[in-house]
Image: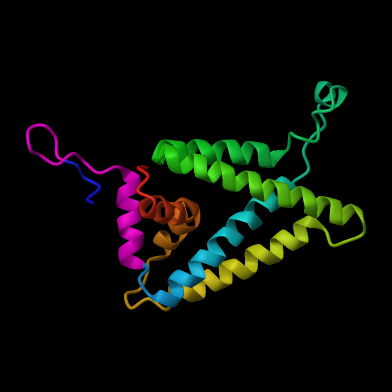
Amino acid sequence: MSAAKKTKKGREAPKRPVDVYFETFNRQYQHPVNRAIQWIALPVFAFGILGLVWMIPFPEIAFLKKYGYDTFVNWGSFFIAGLVYYYLRLAPTLSYAMLLTIGIYSFFIVRLEYVEQAGGPAVWSVCACLLLASLLVLYLGKGMERVAVPFRSFLKLLLIGPIWLWHFAFKKLNIPY
């Protein structure tokens, strides 16, 4: 099904930016091994970024501490809000799927915090290792493509890649996004 739909007068309606991004990614990233890499490395990359932002020290706010909400507000909260808002502007339904994904990531980041408190590795170091490993694998996968992928497009993939992966599931289930 084409992303551009016919208007009442028979002209094609302009494509949404998200559809243009997805078409570009589908053209640029066609190697089957690279696609498999992306299905694994893009979520790991997103988790690593969120974990690192989450662990940036946040200033104490007295009234939040008084009511016990200080543990729920951190830089990750603001990062999540901005990211979900950006995704919401691109494709509302996909942003809800990403919100679910971010909720799952948040659960595991909190679990990693408990592991760190019990004497395990620091959350930031685990997330940094995951981020660097996934970034390296994604960059190497980019080199598998027949046509060289511009670096700017690669950076856009890192930002929009998680909802690009969700769009495949939505298409398979015939859910409009």
Image side of residue 83 versus residue 130, left or right: left
Q: Quadrant of residue 116?
A: bottom right
Q: Quadrant of residue 146?
A: bottom left
Residue that lies at the very extreme toward the left in this rendered image: 9
| Residue in view at x 47 percent, y 39 percent | 86
| Residue in view at x 85 percent, y 56 percent | 115
Q: Nearer the viewer, residue 152 or 147?
A: 147
Q: Position of residue 39 (x, y in %)?
A: 50, 65
Magenta-colored stretch includes residue 88: no
Q: Position of residue 176 (x, y in %)?
A: 35, 42
Q: How is the image coloured?
A: rainbow
Magenta-colored stretch includes residue 16: yes
The segment highlighted magenta reads 6-28
Image side of residue 78 versus residue 39, left or right: right
Q: Position of residue 2 (x, y in %)?
A: 22, 50
Residue that lies at the very extreme toward the front in this rendered image: 173
- Classify the position of the C terminus by image quarter: top left
Q: Position of residue 80 (x, y in %)?
A: 60, 40
| Residue in view at x 82 percent, y 31 percent | 60
Q: Nearer the viewer, residue 117 or 175?
A: 175
Q: How many marks?
A: 0
Q: Quadrant of residue 151?
A: bottom left
